[in-house]
Every structure is written in structure tokens, then in C-alpha cells.
Amino acid sequence: MAIITPLKTAAEQQLAEQFANVKAELPGAGAVRKLREDAFAGFEAKGLPHRRLESWRYTDLRSLVREAMPLARRSERPQAVADRLAIQTIPGPRLVSIDGIFSPTDSDLDTLPEGVTVRSLAEALTEAPEATAAALALPEVARDDSALMLNAAFARDGIVIEIAPGVELSRPILLLGIDSGAKETAQFSRVLVSVGAGAKATVVEQCESVGAAPSQINSALSFAVGDNAEVEHVRIVTRQRPETVRVQSLLAEIGAHANFASVALATCCGVLRQQSFVRYAGEHSRAALRGINLLRKQEHSDVTLVMDHAAAHGESRELFKNIIEGEATGVFQGKVVVRQHSQKTDGSMKSNALLLNDGATMFNKPELEIFADDVVCGHGATVAQMDGEQLFYLMARGLPRPQAEALVLTAFAGEVTEFVGDEAVREIVMREIDRWLSQREAAPKLETI
Amino acid sequence: MLEIRNLVVKIADEDKQILNGLNLTVNAGEVAAIMGPNGSGKSTLSYVIAGKEDYEVLDGEILLNGENILEMEADARAAAGIFLAFQYPLEIPGVATMTFLKAAMNAQRKARGEAELLTPDFIKQVNTAADSLGIARDMLRRPLNVGFSGGEKKRMEILQMALLAPSMCILDETDSGLDIDALRIVADGVNALRAKNRGFLVITHYQRLLDHIVPDTVHVMSKGKIVRTGGKELALELEKSGYASYGEAA
Amino acid sequence: MAAVQETIDQVKSIDVTEYKYGFVTEIEVDKPAKGLTEDTVRYISARKNEPEWMLEWRLDAFRRWKTMTEPNWSRVQYPPIDYQDIYYYAAPKKGAAPKSLDEVDPAILETYKKLGIPLSEQEILAGVAPENRVAVDAVFDSVSVVTTFKEELAKAGVIFCSISDAIREHPELVKKYLATVVPVTDNYFATLNCAVFTDGSFVYIPKGVRCPMELSTYFRINEQNTGQFERTLIIADEGSYVSYLEGCTAPKRDENQLHAAVVELIALDDAEIKYSTVQNWYPGDAEGKGGIYNFVTKRGDCRGKRSKISWTQVETGSAITWKYPSCILRGDGSRGEFYSIAVSNGAQQVDSGTKMLHLGKNTTSKIIAKGIAAGKSDSTYRGMVSAHRKATGARNFTNCDSLLIGDQCGAHTIPYIEAKTASAIFEHEATTSKIGEDQMFYCQQRGLSEEEAVALIVNGFVKEVLQQLPMEFAVEAQKLITISLEGSVG
């Protein structure tokens, strides 16, 4: 079928105007400017991602983003942001961004462990345009992704974190991203984390909104994981405005014998697209992506990931759990690509969803794309309701139905939470899950099988 | 204690009727056995007493200490004193056995208006009961029933029975899948719980279990009804003659 | 590893010329000029002595087709097809519309004999128990040359004839059901088929009748540069049962040939249709020269309550396969099944799978797909399972496994699983692996050669699907799989 270039939508036209107005003032000249212009040209050719594109089949940004909101800038801080900043969640250095813009004064820059350097993306773009532009470029498997193109074109700020080779961090680095929600804004930001060979780090992303206005958020976090390094990533997205559209990209390039593990929790997520692109650049590396999505009302969560086995002896583990009630929609699209010379790849991908009532929807698309013969790859996907037999067993032991259901649901999510290595972080994850469960309406009675 | 009157039950969503006007009484302190061929409705009876939702009660009533329990949900029945030892105990991945035991004990205490157990008391109770049933401590830390052998699962059922101290215990084919040693441990566990304020309903296909848990009364069930009632000698008679004379193949 | 290297070497030197049905039958044929215009459509309709309504229907489809574009979403690659460089009709001159076997060109009868499909009823009757008899509709290029056991079937009320005969003799049934499962504009190739379909089979099983024998159609493409556009329509009325088999072969030619078929199945209340295919079109040579483009739309409609449609396919041939036999589970309590073995070798490309659309209550479906890729071939399983909001109690189990032989091939799995009702239970599992070295070692240690060991393991891999085929077909299919993998496995 011929690719028909549709007429530009209002939002696409507004984005073009915004880019024309703002490109001169965005940080970074030379290579950065070129990257931004190329990225925007790429976006203009494709437009906002829409349902006719296979990788955006279930999340149609073209219809979700009717109008492009004004770009966020550093501004007066509302009280709600200050209140949120007063709450310490986990021990460890905290790096704060407000509306996608790094706030050094709110961040623990003085107490950074030795071997860790932090600066703002704006600074890096200005001072080291070539290197930073290279780090912003789209990875091979996502080269057609117009959401990432927008991110590269518009990213005004973010954080650049460098962890020197061999450095082992004992406490997690917290990236606290606050969406002030004082007025409607579009936020484009990028965090670049490079982890030197043999280093060890945990990076936690907490994304929260504190205001009343919805936002359009397009943020990306890139990891360059050196050989023999070990990185744990945890993302918690909560308290979004229902109308907020958030595209959260995770890019990871993994060196030889390195280990990368990510767990993402989303509750109260508005419209959320989490897309991850992991590339195995060196042999014998391991990566695991896991996640929990707790969805209700009209919420929409799309988890799309590509594990690109470009080197041999790689191992990948994906496990995603969706619990869906109300009229909410869960999406899982996972693709494991094994290139021709990536022999001895070991891949396992699972997506399990529980639909708690009719009207809840789950779309699953677990894909394998394999060009090497000496591999063991598998995937499994299930969609079901809560197990009536299990519930009966628990109730026959005296647990009231809501408690029995909470126990079954916690256990269902527990298969993922157990992979959060840091205890304090796991605690926060569990607390968010409990909070979500406690907000369930008097558990609706399920039909028996 | 437990009184069942003219109980008529069918499977929900199907036309298949399983219990056809069943009458049964179990008194406090009594151990009653129900024997019968496969398909006579024994397991259905145990599920209906415990409150499983896959069945529809068309007629009759089930009284526990004079109160009709049919309108109660399964957890309320448990709190009222009904305990069902499952033929096939469910595996609950991700839920540690200890967590589950504590949740169940406290839920029942709460329903009865009692204070929650203090953790040290709880652990002491569990350990004592587990030791007497030969249940290793590390099993208690594992997810409930996940990866347990058939014998381990059945012992776990008896452990729960001991901890929850119900007034009416129903054992559904508790002997199935047990070797002779495991059978003895389970039977000893049950016998230790025999008390004058507690009733037992032991459902079994074979007489073997009744050598170890000696019943006061034996009922023969066929085609969804109790067709004969006698003393413990009835079990031995059945062992010899089989169920053929009750109109069904064994 | 030495053994593996050896296998890889064998794959490289693969000789796909093993295709044993690649001969050509020399007969005189009747065909119009190449190309596709309204006149071509009129020509075909006229040659078939079709009523006016049928011609109008075709012309309407043709006009719509001209406004459509060829789909490009599948994982197959081929040079653009020149639709003006194809013959759309080819019929043996001698004995057109034969009344009996005596009128059929002996060269054609000989062809079917060589293919192992005897068409003479006497021959079939000799030595075959009545319950094992198979009625055959033999389609040679664009026409059905003969349909066997018609009378005997008629006694049971079963209609089994070519679709051309059905259009003339049973217009009420054709009008009622044609294109009700695959709409005229369903997809590019289906619409093309509506305009230019030439022949195929028509089956009607009346209420309560269990078809007394297996029915089968044997498709043979013989002519060069000819497209085959088969159209099959099977209706199982309330409470009836039919098992239908389909076989296909073509000569070895350097040019690609297009086969664009449409098959529609309709099962009314409590009816059951079992549809089995052994597809062995010429796959082209090892470099990908020649071979059939098999672009097929097959769909079953479980229209009635408790109806059942079961697809079984063994796909070993064709240069490119693009087909998704599907089930629309409309009737409450209806059931759909899909069992598939797709073997690809040489430069073959397969993009195949199924759709199970759960619309009615308590509908169930099962998908078992086994893909074996060798040589430089590319094999994709693409499937969709969906439960409509009202499809309460929908159940699906899917298992798709791929086996790779050699490191030049690719195997892909693209399932879509969409649930919109909480009471649906969908389970999907898929694996991709190669034959385990320890399995191989075990077999070889017990005295099997490497080739025998691979054949044994492959047969084990596909067994679950083979069991769904009628006995004789299963044996044939098993042989076919082994032959298809020759050079790569033995």
C-alpha cells in the first residue's frame, strides 16, 4: 500500500511553528543544531505517531494530541512544587527537574559520591556539542520513531550524569521529575547517563504531577552501560492528570558482560506510553525489563519495547503485569530481535494481564524476530480474570473478598516487585501498589467460570 | 451442629443437578464419614457447605448451630466455624505461607470481634503446630502450596485447621495421593483435634482413611443423596461389597 | 559442533530441484490474450456460461479492484507483479465441460495419475473400503475437469460440484452465501479473485447429514504465465458434518505464477467443517527463481450456535505464502481451530497464521502453529485472537513454535491478542529454538544417522498437527515434509 502522507493536523502545524520560533534559542550550535533540524524534518515527514504505524497501533498520538501545548520554560515555582520537594522519599542524592528543566539549586550536587559528575543538558549541549549530539541521536531500531524525533528536536534541558569506571554506588541516584501543572505545557527533556566499565549504579526515576493542569510530556532517558557494568533502573510514574499525555522513552546500549535491569511501575498514569529500546552491543550481556501497570477509569498505558540482540550470548528477560479495571486500556508490545550472528541468545518474554471487569481492555503483541539458529527464545502472554478457585480458597479460610482479592493482586504484582534490588525503593513501589489497591471501589463481584 | 435439610443443588450455568434432596446431621463431638462412589456428589457437598459460587442451591437449607448459612459468603462461613480441607489445595504464587496464615487467622478473629494476634504469639502458635505435623520451618516461608508435594499440601491443610480452630471440619478426600506414612501423620493431626465441641465430616472413597480416623457414623451417598447410615462397621462392609448394590459402579 | 557445521554446509548446497511434481503436461489449451480488462472478465464469464447477475457481480468487483492498492504489510518481498502480463484463463481444449471421464483428455488423466490422484471411480473403488473413499474435484488451470462420486453423494443430498456448475445449477445457494464471509472488497487479492475467479469447488451439506465420504479438490497449475484464481464455497447446514481436503501442485518454471484463491466456509447451528490443505505448489529454486505466489484468503464463519470449523494446513510449497485461514466465532458456543505446519527451505518466504475473532458467548478456539525454516527461507507466524466486549466466556489457547535449521534463515512470531471482556481467558505461548544438540547426540548414540535423527525430531515437532489430518493425508504430508527439508536435514 502506498504510504499516504496525510494532511497536517492542527497540532502538527503548531509544532512546526513552535520549532521555527524556538530553534534559534534552543541550546547547542553546530552538530546539535543540525541534529535538531534533521530530527524535526524527520518528524515533519512522518507526523505524530498514529494507529496505522505498527509500533503505535494501539496509541494514536495524532488523535490524542489535538493541540500542541506551549513549550515549558523555567518559571515561578508554585507552592505545590515546594511542598513536594520537602518530602524525601529515598536516601541518596536527588536530582530535581521541574517541567523537564534541571534545577541544580534543588539538587544534591554537593553530596554526590566520588566518581559521579552531573551537569545540565543545556550546559553539555553548549560546551560539548559534538559528543552530546551523538548521544542524542536515535538508535537504529527506533530510527523511525517520530516521538523520539520530537524529543531530539525540542529537548531544551535535562541532566547529564557520568559515572566513572569502577565506581560502585552504595545508594541510588534519584531523578525526581516534577510536572508543576500550574498551566498547560509541553515538556521535552532528556537525561543521559553513562556508566563506566565495571561501575555499579542504581538510578530511580520518579515522575509526578502536582498541579491541576494537564501536560504533554516527552522525556527520554539514555543509558550507555560500559563493559562489566551493572545498572539497575526503577521508574515510578504516578499522580498524573487524567488528560496528561506522557511519552517516556528508555534507551540503553549495553556493553559486554554488563547487566542492565529495569522495573517500571505506573499508577494513575493518564495516557502513558513507555517505550524502551535496548541494544546489546557487547557479548555476554544481560538485560531485563519488567513492569507493573495498575489501571482504572479511562487510563491508557502502552508498554512497547524492542530488545535488539546485536551481539552473541545475550540474555533478555521481560515480564510485564497489567491489572486493569474500569474502562482502562493496557497495551503490551514486545519485540525480541535476534540478529544473524547473535548466536546463543537466550530470550524470555512474558506479559500477564488481569481484567477485573468487562469494559477493561488489554492488547498484547509479543513478537519474536529471529535470524540466528542457535537460540532459545520464547514468549508467553495471558489475559484472564482473577482466579476464582484461588479466591474461594482464601475466602474459605476466612479472608473477606476485598482482602482476598488484594492478596491475589499483590502476589500477581509481586512477581515483578521482587526484582527491585534496593529495599528502600522496593518499599516505595509496594506502597504505591497498596495505595492503588486501597482505592479500588468495593471490589466488584466477578462472574464465576 | 451441622444440619442439612433436603438440599437440592445444580451446577450454575448448566442443567446438571448434583444433589437431589440430601439430608444429613453431624452433632458436636461427632465424627461422621461420607462414603460413596465417584460422581455421587461428595465433593460438591463439601463445596456447597463451604460456599463455593459455581453451584446453585435450588432447594433446602444448611444450618450451622441452627442458623442458615446459605446466604453467607465463604469468608463469613469460615468465620462462623466451617473449615474445608481441600482435596486439591490451591497454589497461591507470591503469597508466603506465613503471610497467608496470619491474614486468615486475623481476618477470622476480626470477624468474631476479637483482637488481632500479636506477632510473637502468632509465630509461636504456628511453630508448635508445624512441629507436631512434621512441617519444616522453611516450608512456611515459601509461597503457599507452590511446589509442595501432595503430602505436604495435605499437612498444610491440617496445620491451617489446627490454627483456625474451626467448630465444623470437613475433610474432602484428604487421603488421596498420600502414602501410608503421610496418611498416619495427617490422621494423627486430625485425631488430636477431636473435641466434644467440634464436628467432623470425613469424605472418602476408600475405607483406608477410616482405619486411622475412626468415625462414629458412616453415611453412604449415591446419586446426590444419603442412601444409608450406620456405624463404623458399615465402612468395612462397603470395602468388601463395593458400591454396586447402591446402583452405581464403584 | 562438527555435525552442525555439516548441516549448514548441506543447507548451502541445497538442491530444491527435488520437487517431484514439476513436470509439464503437453496439451492444447484455450486462452484469451494476456492482461486484465473488463473484456477479460466478460470472456471468463462467457466461457463459464454464467448468468447475467454473475457477470455484473464480477464487473462490479473489477471496478472496485482498480481503485485498490496492493497490501505491503506482510514480511515478504517480491518484485512488482505486472497484472497485465498474466493469462487469466486457460482451459484444456479437448473435452471442455466433459460429461464423463471418457471425455477428459487422456493426458490430463495421466497427469493426475502421476500425481497419485486416480480419477476413475472404478480404480478408486478397487481395493478401498467404502469408509475410506474420497470424492475428488480435479481443477486443471482454470477449469474443473471432473468431479467424482457425484451421484453417490447426491443420494445423501450432498451437493459437490465445481463452483461454475453451482452458479448455473444452484444459483439460490450461491447468491445466498457467496462473499458473505469474505466481502468483495475484503482485500486486494480477494477482490481480484471476485473479478476473475475461474473454478473451484462448491459443497452443500444438508441439515443433519454427515457427509458419507471425504471430499477433496486437487488443484493443478499447468500453463505458463497463468494465474489461478480458485473460488471455493462450503456450506454445512444445521447439524451436518463434512471433511474436506485440498491439494495443490504446479510445474517447475522460471517465472513466478500467481495463485489468488478465496475460500469461504459457513457452518450453521451444530454443524462442523474440517478443512485440510496440503499445499505443495512449486517453491522455486534455491536462489528464489520461479515458484508460485500463493496469496490466499481463507475464512470460516461459525454462524450457528455450537458450530465448529477446523483448519489444518501443511504448507511446504510456493515461493511466497501469504494466507491466514481464519474463524469468525459468531454463534454462541462455537469453536474454531487452526493447526498448521509451515516448512520453508531454499529462498521461500512464508507469512501465515490465523485470526480467531470471538464474537459470540462462550466461544473457544485453539491455535497450534509449527514453523520449520531452513536454507535461506523466512518464516513468519502472524495471528490475531480477539474477544469482543460481548464475547463473555471466550477462551483461546495458542501455541506457536519455530524450529530453525541453519543460520541463514529467519523465524518470526507476530501475535496480536486483544481482549475486551474480563471473562475471556487467552493463553499464548511461543518458542523458537534449534534442534538440540543433546537430542541429536542421543539419537545418534542409539544408532540413527544425522539425517534420520533430524527427520525423527522434526516429525515429533509437528506430530500434534499431523494427527489432525485424515490418515492417508498425514502419511503423505509426513513424506512431503521430509522431502522439503532434503539437503538441509536428509
Image: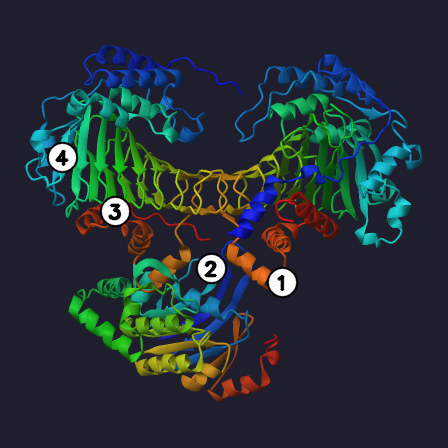
Q: CA distance from mark 1 to mark 3?
A: 58 Å
Q: Residue A311 vs residue A263: left or right? A: right
Could you tell me the amino acid type at mark 4?
Thr
Q: CA distance from mark 3 to mark 4?
A: 33 Å
Rendered position, C179 above or below C18:
above
Q: How many marks?
A: 4
Q: CA distance from mark 4 to mark 2?
A: 65 Å
Could you tell me the amino acid type at mark 2?
Tyr
Q: Residue B223 vs residue C160: left or right? A: left
Along the line of sight, which residue is nearer the eye, C446 or C336? C446
| Camera-side mark, 1 or 3 | 1
Residues at marks 1 and 3 touching, judged by CB atoms closer than 8 Å: no
Q: State the SS at label 3.
A: helix
Rendered position, A170 above or below C74:
below
Can marks 1 and 3 be said to lie on one chain?
A: no
- Give the image quarter of residue C143: top right
Mark 2 lies on residue: B55
Residue at 35% x, 70% y: name it. B83
Mark 4 lies on residue: A117
